Amino acid sequence: MTNTLAQRQQQLLAYMQGHTAKSEDDICQHIVQQGKVATAQRLGIYQNAYNVRLKETIDTDHQILGRYLGDDLYEQMMEEFIALCPSQHFSLRHFADPLPDFLNGQPPFNEHPQIAELARFERLLLSAFDARDAKRATLDQLTQLEQDKWPNIKLRFHPSVQLFVSQWNVVNMWQQLKQDQTPPEPVQEKNAWLVWRNQERFTEFRPVDNIAVAMLEMFQRGKNFADVCQALLEHLPEKEVSPTALNILLNWFEQGLIQYIKSD
């Protein structure tokens, strides 16, 4: 069989990831001997550098998770994740995207579900920070709409807007760890947070109630303002629906969460 560059690349990658002993023999045949350092030793140095770079990537993305786990458990997590979840992207930015799912399924981490949720929160912060840029609708654009157009309002949220729904108090844990303080004990409590990048390019997050979550999810599904208000009747008395929905809308525009308004 004709050897190709793609085959050599696959053999080198297999060796870097430590998959088989045969991969070392295969790639060694194509490494030119230089100086006094043996080919196998040179490959070993390269393999070590590859794994160190992956660990640095995880550590950059998940500093707070590392503080929570402690050095030994964090090192174990990184080694097992690198072995079981090899990189699938050209960019290291996405290397640790599968980490929350890994933590959900891999002992001993899955015995403490707040660990996976803490990792998921950190990844949402990254996603919000890295989201593409876009213009934001202004509060004036909303308030200047003609009254008869309000029922048909549809919203497109800024690309950085993320909804984090958690079953544990991991945001409070994250905040304490960020300040180098002892985190609270894990408490099972359902809560929701909005995460986004503000106009000064800082990532923000704040808690949101069930009404705001319902509105957000309906607007994201393409529903208009009339549909949203009708659905809120299941949660609020009729006289409270319009002022509550309007107040949430105003807050969203003031915080720069809306990319544009569409009114058919």
Image (tube, rainbow, N blue to C red):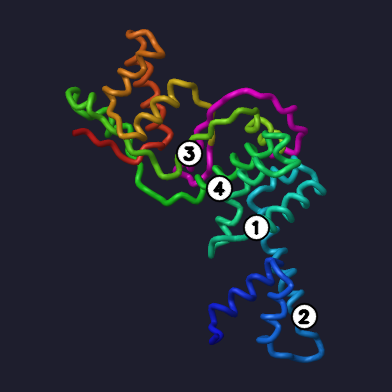
Q: Which is nearer the N-term, disc 1 or disc 4?
A: 1
Where's residue 173, x and y in %? 69, 32
Three-letter code for the amino acid on which mark 3 is drawn: Gln
Query: Toward which corner of the image does residue 236 lie, by quadrant?
Result: top left
Question: Which of the labelled discs sits on residue 57, or is there none?
Answer: 1
Distance from Cα at disc 4 to Cα at disc 3: 10 Å
Distance from Cα at disc 3 to Cα at disc 1: 22 Å
Query: Which label sits in the foreground, 1 or 2?
Result: 2
* Image-based side of 237 in relation to 102, left or right: left
The foreground one among 254 and 183 is 183
Q: Label 3, on which residue?
A: 162
Q: Secondary structure at mark 1?
A: helix
Q: Secondary structure at mark 3?
A: strand
The foreground one among 92 and 133 is 92
Three-letter code for the amino acid on which mark 4 is drawn: Leu
Q: Label 2, on which residue?
A: 40
